[in-house]
Image (spheres, rainbow, N blue to C red):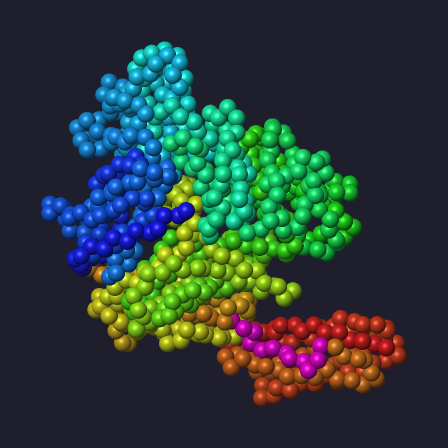
């Protein structure tokens, strides 16, 4: 059962900056221990609340007078003796200043010590000669690595003794990539590990010591990088550990058992899994082990284990839990289909951290074996394959294997086949948002297209009263007009939402839901919910992957904060304009004098769209005001897109971003043909009539309309519709030579005079119709 959130309120209140936790005095402790936990950072005011799920009694302590106000918050933490081994989040919430970032705290089963160099830099332990001696085992060492720092610990081992060495760093939100080496008494390396199976980029190894004596454990960052979060916990002891779990998931609310496998286990260990609750993951621990729990993915769909039968059949909408149990093994399944059907095949494996399978999925025609599509991964995750069933195909064969031909107990997967045309996923790029009183803050959402290339809208359905969402417009993939993209159906987009606090908005502390909606041409709808990071720690260096702790499965935490010293206002939230039109966009900066005099609105298009330019307008005559020129042309896609008004101003010597509520532009055709019908019956004399709708911002005049793709024997002479006329009618004639049947025709149009200095013809959207000849 998930522990309740503990809220601790300090009595006093001081003005402060938004809270930021940069470090903890210690990043973990043994269950049952009582310790002083000090949060270190900025804006840590005594009036703040501590939000945490730590299984502990927590009480406030008075900050030390010698410390600079707002830089530390001390707590007395009494961990329960029966506290589950695991990782727990904590953060600060200030009613005036909002939420802090999340830090993680590890509750362990082994006795804890703190590296002496942490408290006394005059006691370095980077050499065998100066190694810090660990007087007893088992133990967990809390240490730090600064840049090229190396930490060496001396310990004694008995002949034949087995010891496990395991780091907790990345899993706790540390930016270091720990490497672990074991040295003999002469300083020679006898074992080493960098990234351990089942432990991400943390290190783990087990060593059998051949003889009694003194040995050394050497810990360092694998790249010797200077990281902002540079802590680690090194566990040393004789204990069992697993590397994976099977199955890697199950159905929520259904009693389940799983096997913990790999590591130093002689055989799989069966464990019960608690599947209740709304969380995306259940945590499953190896009994008696100090290792952290394994993740077990939960779904709300029917689930089965793979069959041992030679001919395995997929059931649509049912998740199959399988495993590539041996090297070179391939699992195959068949699925009955019909030509023209649209299917989506989804595999979940290594993305959960619970499987070592780098899945390669191949979909083939079961009759003859011709491969239709094959894919290994998508955006660094597991493969998802959309497929339109070709003509002549009645049965598919879906094959799963490891890309490198590997296999074993830790190579589990989840496979599902769904009758869907395409899909997409949403990922929040921030774990929390602080909304200034009377102001605006942004939320960015990363979108991974998985076969769906159309438009979508990002929403926050549970935003409380007094707060307003804007933006979240995602244009079709083609609107970006990136002709160098070979497969836009599998591209990435970013959407931005603004949240604005109304002047009378009440104080806020809420967990928000972010979802995306895509309406399909067929009338269906795709609805997907955004997953959020638990935290975001970006390691220094090139091509370093951010630490996100997404297994925390958090909603978007939101809180109100104090007002900013300036704000940006715009006259309208929505603008509709015709292709080829230039729009003067005005704004006003109010508040601090420095903001009004130094700020200038930035050109910030929040939707990927091509053939669009935004230029600075003429110099403002009134301080604190300005304008931009939004330039479209005839090739600008006809689609909605978002513009984010953003100005960076100097506030007390610090650059501060000030946002206005998102403005959505809707670029539309300059005019449209609206025929009174889309199907006509040919006769000796018949008409094709309708209305011509011109946009108010369209500067064109006369419009020419003609019918194309007419069959032989039928003529519809082109017409010209004057600028002051809406109705149109084409007089058509049919002869007996016209071929009988139903023919597709097109109504095409153009405006040769668009009011521009440079002569340019605007072509309106075509209209499709049918002509029946009896």
Residue at (31, 49) in percent of width and height = 52
Residue at (18, 51) in percent of width and height = 70
Q: Whole-percent x and y of residue 634?
A: 55, 70
Left or right of residue 540, residue 114 in this image: left
Residue extent of the magenta highlight: 667-678
Residue at (43, 27) in percent of width and height = 240
Left or right of residue 204, residue 655 in this image: left
Asked whether residue 596 appears in the rendered view, the answer is yes
The quarter holding residue 713 reads bottom right
Q: Whole-percent x and y of residue 36?
A: 21, 41
Front residue of 548 and 352: 352
Is 673 colored magenta in this rendering? yes
Quarter of the image that includes the C terminus = bottom right
- As drawn, the residue found furthest toward the left would be 65
Left or right of residue 564, residue 510 in this image: right
Front residue of 733 and 489: 489
The quarter holding residue 593 reads bottom left
Left or right of residue 409, residue 654 in this image: left
Front residue of 471 and 503: 503
Q: Whole-percent x and y of residue 659?
A: 34, 65
- As drawn, the residue found furthest toward the bottom would be 724
The quarter holding residue 213 reads top left
Is 753 colored magenta in this rendering? no
């Amino acid at each position: 059962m998930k522990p309740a959130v503990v809220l601790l309120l300090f009595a006093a209140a001081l003005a402060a900056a938004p809270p930021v936790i940069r470090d903890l005095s210690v990043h973990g402790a043994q269950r049952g221990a009582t310790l002083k936990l000090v949060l270190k950072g900025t804006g840590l005011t005594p009036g703040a609340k501590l939000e945490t799920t730590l299984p502990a009694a927590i009480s406030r302590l008075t900050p030390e007078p010698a410390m600079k106000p707002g830089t530390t918050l001390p707590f007395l933490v009494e961990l329960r003796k029966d506290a589950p081994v695991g990782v727990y989040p904590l953060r600060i919430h200030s009613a005036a200043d909002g939420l802090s970032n999340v830090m993680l705290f590890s509750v362990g089963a082994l006795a804890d010590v703190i590296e002496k160099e942490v408290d006394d830099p005059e006691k370095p332990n980077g050499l065998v000669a100066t190694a810090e001696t660990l007087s007893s085992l088992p133990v967990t060492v809390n240490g730090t690595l600064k840049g090229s720092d190396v930490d060496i610990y001396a310990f004694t081992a008995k002949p034949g003794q087995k010891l496990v060495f395991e780091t907790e760093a990345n899993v706790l939100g540390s930016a270091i990539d720990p490497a672990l080496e074991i040295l003999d008494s002469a300083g020679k390396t006898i074992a080493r590990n960098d990234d351990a199976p089942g432990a991400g980029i943390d290190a783990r190894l087990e060593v059998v010591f051949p003889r009694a004596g003194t040995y050394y454990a050497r810990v360092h960052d694998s790249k010797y990088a200077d990281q902002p979060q540079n802590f680690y916990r090194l566990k040393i002891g004789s204990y069992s550990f697993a590397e994976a779990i099977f199955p890697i998931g199950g159905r929520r609310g259904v009693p389940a058992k799983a096997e913990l496998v790999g590591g130093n286990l002689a055989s799989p260990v069966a464990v019960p899994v608690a599947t209740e609750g709304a969380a995306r993951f259940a945590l499953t621990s190896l009994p008696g082990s100090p290792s952290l729990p394994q993740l077990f993915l939960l779904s709300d769909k029917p689930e089965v284990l793979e069959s041992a039968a030679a001919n395995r059949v997929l059931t649509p909408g049912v998740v199959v839990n399988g495993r590539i149990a041996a090297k070179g093994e391939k699992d195959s399944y068949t699925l009955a289909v019909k030509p023209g059907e649209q299917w989506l095949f989804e595999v979940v494996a290594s993305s959960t951290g619970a499987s070592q399978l780098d899945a390669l999925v191949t979909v083939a025609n079961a009759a003859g074996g011709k491969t239709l599509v094959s894919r290994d991964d998508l955006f660094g995750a597991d493969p998802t394959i959309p497929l339109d069933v070709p003509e002549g195909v009645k049965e598919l064969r879906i094959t799963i294997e490891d890309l490198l031909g590997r296999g074993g107990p830790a190579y589990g997967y989840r496979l599902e086949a769904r009758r869907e045309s395409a899909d997409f996923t949403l990922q929040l790029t921030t774990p929390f948002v602080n909304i200034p009183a009377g102001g605006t803050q942004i939320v960015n959402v990363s979108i991974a297209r998985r076969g769906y290339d159309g438009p979508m809208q990002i929403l926050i359905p549970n935003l409380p009263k007094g707060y307003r969402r804007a933006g979240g417009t995602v244009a079709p993939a083609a609107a970006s007009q990136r002709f160098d993209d070979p497969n836009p159906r599998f591209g990435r987009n970013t959407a931005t939402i603004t949240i604005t606090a109304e002047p009378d908005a009440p104080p806020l502390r809420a967990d928000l839901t972010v979802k995306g909606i895509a309406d399909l041409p067929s009338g269906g709808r795709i609805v997907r919910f955004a997953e959020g990071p638990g935290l975001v720690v970006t390691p220094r260096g090139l091509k370093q992957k951010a630490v996100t702790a997404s297994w925390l499965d958090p909603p978007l935490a939101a809180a109100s904060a104090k007002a900013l010293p300036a704000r940006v206002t715009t006259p309208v939230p929505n603008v509709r304009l015709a292709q080829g039109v230039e729009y003067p966009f005005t704004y006003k900066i109010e508040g601090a004098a420095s903001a009004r005099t130094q700020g200038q609105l930035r050109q910030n298009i929040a939707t990927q769209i091509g053939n669009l330019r935004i230029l600075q307008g003429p110099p403002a005559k009134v301080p604190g005001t300005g304008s931009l020129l939004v330039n479209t042309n005839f090739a600008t896609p006809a689609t909605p897109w978002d513009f984010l008004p953003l100005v960076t101003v100097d506030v007390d010597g610090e650059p501060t971003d000030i946002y206005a509520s998102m403005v959505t532009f809707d670029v539309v055709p300059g005019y449209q043909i609206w025929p009174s019908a889309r199907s006509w019956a040919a006769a000796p004399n018949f008409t094709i009539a309708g209305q011509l709708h011109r946009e108010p911002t369209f500067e064109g005049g006369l419009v020419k309309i003609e019918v194309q793709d007419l069959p032989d024997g039928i003529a519809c002479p082109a017409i010209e519709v004057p600028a002051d006329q809406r109705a149109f009618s084409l007089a058509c004639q049919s002869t007996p030579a016209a071929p009988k049947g139903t023919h597709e025709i097109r109504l095409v149009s153009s405006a040769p005079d668009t009011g521009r200095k440079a002569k340019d013809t605007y072509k309106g959207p075509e209209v499709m119709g049918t002509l029946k000849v009896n």
